[in-house]
C-alpha cells in the first residue's frame, strides 16, 4: 500500500480538525475525497504535504512503508509526494523555468538520477506544457505572479507532470476554473494516471469527477471519513447533497452541490 | 604659508618637527596620524609636490573636523569609537622592487588570491578581465595593460598614475569629492596609499570590463583606497569592484573614495560586490566601511550608473551619488544591501539634478535578517535651473525574522516646478506560505529562502555583469545561511 493513514487525529491551535481518518491508497489508484466546507479536506491535504501548523495528536501515516509524519516537507516532496495547491503561491521575480528546474533536479538527485541541464529541461518542459495547454513564454514569467486562476491550476498540473510524483494530492484543483479549463486540467491529470502512481482528488463538487473518474470515493465530514464507495458515490452526493450522509442538514450545505 | 605651524596647532602635536621622524625604509608606518606620517607616505610613494600639498590640505581639514565634531553622527548606525591614532596608515608587502610579471609575484600572495577565487592568472585572460589586484596598499600585479594601451586606455594603480600621468591626476583628483567633503573623505585624501586610476580617451569604448579586487590582510592597518575614473567625450567603460577579506577579530576601518567623471556623451558603469568580513554572530569584529563614492556627469548626454551588492562589513556607510551637471545626463543607482546577525547598513544615494532634462533612477533592495539593521537614505535634489528633471525611486525592504529592522529615509528637495519626482516604497516579509510552497516542490528551506531573496533582488542583479551576477547570488545565499528556521 502506497499511502496508509490510520486513526489520524490533528488539531490547529488546540482546535481538533481531523478526528480519526482511516484511508488506504494503493499505487495506480485514483481516490476522490469529497466533503462539505470545513470537513477537514484541505487540512488533510496540507498535513500530508508537511505543513507544520497542524499538530498530530494521534494516529499514523506511512508512505511506501516509511513514517511520513517524521519527514520534513521537502523530504516528502523528494520522496514523491506532490500537492497541487488550492491557492498556488506567487513567487515574484523567480522565473517559472528556474523554479521548476531547481525542483526537478532536487527530486532527481534524491532519486539518484543525473540532473537535467538547461537543454534537457527545456525539451522535457515543452512536451509537458502541451498536456495542459500552456505556451512556452509561460516559462519565463514569475511563478504564479499575475496568473489567472486557470493558469495557476494548469501550472500546478504542469509541475506535477515534470516532478513525476508517486502520490499526487490535488486540493480543489477545480475551484476557479471554467468548463474549458476544467477539461484541460482533467485531461492533463488523466494523462498522468499510471500503474505506479496514486492520485487523491480532493473536491467539494462532483463535476471534476466527471472528467477524472475515481476508483474510489470517500466522503469526509466532521474530520472523519463517513462513507466510502465507488464512482457512483460521487454522483449520489451530487444529487442529494451531503446532508443525507452526514445526517445533519446543517453540517454541510443543504442545497444540492451541483447548483454551484 | 606656515603650513607646519597650522597643523601643529590643530593636532596639538608638541613633538612636531620638520622632516621625517619615521624611517623611510620601514615597511609599516608607526601607529598614529600626524603631518609627519603624511609626509612619510608621500615620500614613500615618491610623490610630486602637488600631491603632498593636497594631502596636507586634506589632513588639516580632517584635523579640524576631528577636533570640532568627530565622525558624522546622522546615520542610523552604532559603533564603538575609532581611535585614529591607534591605526597604522601605511603597510607595504615585503618586496624590494615591484614585480614585472606574475612570475615575480610572491607565490604565497598568489595562493591567497587563488583561495579567494581571483582570476588573476590564466582564468583572467580567458574571462577577458583586466585585474589590478591590490594587496593591502601597494599594487602587486597588473595585467592587460598593453591591450588597453593599444586603444589609449590608461588603467593602472593610483601610484603609477601619480608618477606617469601627474597632469591627469592633478586635473581630476578631488574634482568630484573635494578634500574637505566629509570626515572620512578628508581622512582618505590625507592618507590614501593606493588604488586604481582609469582614463578612457575620447570616443573609445573600453574593450574589456575592468575589475579591481581589494583585500585587507595586515592586522591593524586601515585601508584607504582611492579610485579615479575619467571617461572623456563619448567614451565608455564598465568597471567592476569586488572585495573579500580574511577573518578578523578587531574592527577594521575602511574609508575609500571613488570619483567618477563622465564628459559629454560618455558612460561609466560601476559595479561593486562587497563581502568583507561582517563580524561574528554577536557582532564582534568585522569591517567598518565608510565609503564616499560620487560621480559627476560633467558633460551633456553623459551617464553614470552605480550597481552595488553589499553583503559584508559590520557597518556599511555608503552613498554612491551622481552630480547631474550636463544637460540630458542620466544617473542610476541599483543596490542590494543585506544585513544579517548584528550587521548595520546605512546606504543609499544622492541624485543632484543641476542640468536640464536630467534623469535619474534609484532601485534599492534592502534585506534584513537576524538582528540586522538596514537603512536606505537617499537624496533627490532638483536645482532651480534643472528644467524637466525626472527621478524615479523605488525602495523595497525584505524582512527575515522579527528581530531585524528596515528603515527608509528619503530626502526630496525639488526647486524646479517642471520636474517630476516619483518615490515608491514597500516592505515585505518572506512568507511562510512561500517557503512551504518551495519545500513542497522538493527544495530545502535554505534553497527556498535563497530563491525568494534572489527573486527579490532580480531588478538589481540584472544590472550586474554576468559573472558578478552569479557571484552575487552565491554571496547572498552564504550571507543568509541559517537566517530562517
Image: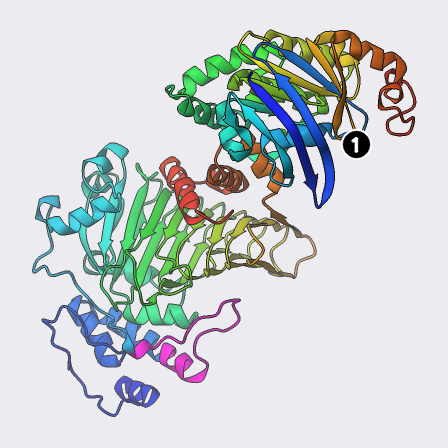
User: In the image, what residue occupies the spot 32% across and 86% down?
Assistant: B11
Out of A130 and A1, give the one closest to the viewer.
A1
Dominant secondary-structure state across the stretch colored magenta? loop
Scheme by which the image is coloured: rainbow
* Left or right of A155 on screen, residue B485: left
Is residue A85 in the magenta section? no
User: In the image, what residue occupies the spot 62% across and 38% down?
Assistant: B433
User: In the image, what residue occupies the spot 11% across and 61% down?
Assistant: B94
Out of B136 and B178, give the one closest to the viewer.
B136
Badge 1 element: loop
Residue B61: x, y in percent? 38, 78
Out of B447 and B49, give the one closest to the viewer.
B447
Residue A66: x, y in percent? 50, 26
User: In the image, what residue occupies the spot 19% across and 73% down?
Assistant: B29
Quadrant containing the C terminus of chain A in the rendered view: top right
Residue B276: x, y in percent? 35, 55
Q: Is residue B436 above or below residue B262?
A: above
Q: Is residue A249 above or below residue B314?
A: above
Out of B332 and B165, give the one closest to the viewer.
B332
Q: Is residue B162 above or below residue A144?
A: below
* Left or right of B82 on screen, residue B121: left
Q: Using the image, name the chain to which the residue with label 1 belongs.
A: A
Magenta stretch?
Answer: B61-85
Among the 4 quarters of the image, the one containing residue A6: top right
Residue B96: x, y in percent? 7, 60
Is residue B80 in the magenta section? yes
Instruction: Identify the residue position indicated by label 1 in the image.
Output: A38
- Kindly tell me whether residue B138 is visible in this rendering: yes
Amino acid at each position: 500500500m502506497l499511502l496508509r493513514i490510520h486513526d489520524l487525529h490533528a488539531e490547529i491551535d488546540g482546535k481538533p480538525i481531523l478526528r480519526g481518518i482511516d484511508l488506504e491508497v494503493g499505487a495506480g489508484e485514483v481516490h476522490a475525497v469529497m466533503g462539505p466546507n470545513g470537513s477537514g479536506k484541505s487540512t488533510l491535504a496540507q498535513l500530508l504535504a508537511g505543513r507544520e501548523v497542524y499538530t498530530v495528536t494521534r494516529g499514523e501515516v506511512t508512505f511506501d512503508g516509511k513514517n511520513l509524519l517524521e519527514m520534513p516537507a521537502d523530504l516528502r516532496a523528494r520522496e514523491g509526494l506532490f500537492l497541487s495547491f488550492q491557492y498556488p503561491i506567487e513567487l515574484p521575480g523567480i522565473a517559472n523555468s528556474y523554479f521548476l528546474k531547481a525542483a526537478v533536479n532536487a527530486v532527481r538527485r534524491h532519486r539518484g538520477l543525473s540532473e537535467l541541464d538547461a537543454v534537457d529541461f527545456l525539451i522535457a518542459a515543452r512536451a509537458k506544457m502541451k498536456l495542459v495547454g500552456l505556451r512556452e513564454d509561460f516559462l519565463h514569467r514569475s511563478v504564479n505572479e499575475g496568473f489567472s486562476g486557470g493558469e495557476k491550476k494548469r501550472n500546478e498540473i504542469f509541475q506535477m507532470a515534470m516532478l513525476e510524483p508517486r502520490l499526487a494530492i490535488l486540493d480543489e484543483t477545480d475551484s476557479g476554473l471554467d468548463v474549458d479549463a476544467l477539461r484541460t486540467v482533467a485531461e492533463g491529470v488523466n494523462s498522468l494516471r499510471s500503474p505506479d502512481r496514486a492520485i487523491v482528488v480532493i473536491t467539494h463538487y462532483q463535476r471534476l469527477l466527471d472528467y477524472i473518474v475515481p476508483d474510489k470515493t470517500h466522503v469526509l465530514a466532521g474530520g472523519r471519513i463517513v462513507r466510502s464507495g465507488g464512482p457512483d458515490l460521487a454522483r449520489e452526493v451530487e444529487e442529494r447533497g451531503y446532508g443525507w450522509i452526514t445526517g445533519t442538514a446543517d453540517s454541510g450545505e443543504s442545497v444540492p452541490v451541483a447548483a454551484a | 604659508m606656515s603650513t607646519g605651524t597650522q597643523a601643529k596647532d590643530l593636532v596639538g602635536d608638541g613633538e612636531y618637527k620638520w622632516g621625517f621622524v619615521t624611517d623611510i625604509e620601514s615597511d609599516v608606518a608607526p601607529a598614529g596620524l600626524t603631518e609627519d606620517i603624511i609626509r612619510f607616505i608621500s615620500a614613500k610613494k615618491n610623490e610630486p609636490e602637488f600631491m603632498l600639498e593636497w594631502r596636507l590640505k586634506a589632513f588639516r581639514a580632517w584635523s579640524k573636523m576631528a577636533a570640532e565634531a568627530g565622525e558624522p553622527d546622522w546615520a542610523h548606525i552604532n559603533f564603538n569609537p575609532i581611535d585614529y591614532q591607534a591605526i597604522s596608515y601605511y603597510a607595504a608587502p615585503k618586496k624590494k622592487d615591484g614585480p614585472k610579471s606574475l612570475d615575480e609575484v610572491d607565490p604565497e600572495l598568489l595562493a591567497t588570491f587563488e583561495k579567494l577565487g581571483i582570476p588573476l592568472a590564466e582564468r583572467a585572460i580567458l574571462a577577458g578581465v583586466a585585474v589590478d589586484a591590490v594587496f593591502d596598499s601597494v599594487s602587486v600585479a597588473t595585467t592587460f595593460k598593453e591591450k588597453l594601451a593599444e586603444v589609449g586606455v590608461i588603467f593602472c594603480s593610483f601610484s603609477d598614475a601619480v608618477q606617469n600621468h601627474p597632469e591627469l591626476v592633478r586635473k581630476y583628483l578631488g574634482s568630484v569629492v573635494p578634500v574637505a567633503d566629509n570626515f572620512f573623505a578628508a581622512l582618505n585624501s590625507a592618507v590614501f596609499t593606493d588604488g586604481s586610476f582609469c582614463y578612457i580617451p575620447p570616443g573609445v569604448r573600453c574593450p574589456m570590463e575592468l575589475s579591481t579586487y581589494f583585500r585587507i590582510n595586515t592586522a591593524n592597518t586601515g585601508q584607504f583606497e582611492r579610485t579615479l575614473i575619467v571617461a572623456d567625450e563619448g567614451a565608455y567603460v564598465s568597471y567592476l569592484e569586488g572585495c573579500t577579506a580574511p577573518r578578523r577579530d578587531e574592527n577594521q576601518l575602511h574609508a575609500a573614495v571613488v570619483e567618477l567623471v563622465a564628459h559629454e556623451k560618455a558612460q561609466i558603469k560601476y559595479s561593486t560586490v562587497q563581502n568583507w568580513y561582517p563580524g561574528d554572530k554577536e557582532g564582534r569584529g568585522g569591517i567598518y566601511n565608510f565609503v564616499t563614492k560620487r560621480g559627476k556627469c560633467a558633460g551633456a548626454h553623459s551617464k553614470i550608473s552605480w550597481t552595488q551588492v553589499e553583503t559584508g562589513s559590520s557597518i556599511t556607510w555608503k552613498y554612491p551619488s551622481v552630480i547631474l551637471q550636463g544637460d540630458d545626463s542620466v544617473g542610476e543607482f541599483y543596490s542590494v544591501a543585506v544585513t544579517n546577525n548584528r550587521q548595520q547598513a546605512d546606504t543609499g544615494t544622492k541624485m543632484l539634478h543641476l542640468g536640464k532634462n536630467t534623469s535619474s533612477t534609484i532601485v534599492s533592495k534592502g534585506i534584513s535578517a537576524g538582528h540586522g539593521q538596514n537603512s536606505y537614505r537617499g537624496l533627490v535634489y532638483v536645482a532651480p535651473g534643472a528644467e524637466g528633471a525626472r527621478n524615479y525611486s523605488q525602495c523595497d525592504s525584505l524582512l527575515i525574522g522579527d528581530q531585524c529592522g528596515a528603515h527608509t529615509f528619503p530626502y526630496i528637495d525639488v526647486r524646479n516646478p517642471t520636474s517630476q519626482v516619483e518615490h515608491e516604497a514597500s516592505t515585505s516579509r518572506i512568507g511562510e506560505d512561500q517557503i512551504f510552497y518551495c519545500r513542497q516542490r522538493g527544495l530545502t528551506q535554505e534553497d527556498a529562502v535563497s530563491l525568494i531573496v534572489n527573486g527579490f533582488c532580480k531588478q538589481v542583479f540584472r544590472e550586474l555583469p554576468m559573472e558578478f551576477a552569479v557571484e552575487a547570488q552565491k554571496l547572498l545565499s552564504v550571507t543568509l545561511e541559517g537566517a530562517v528556521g
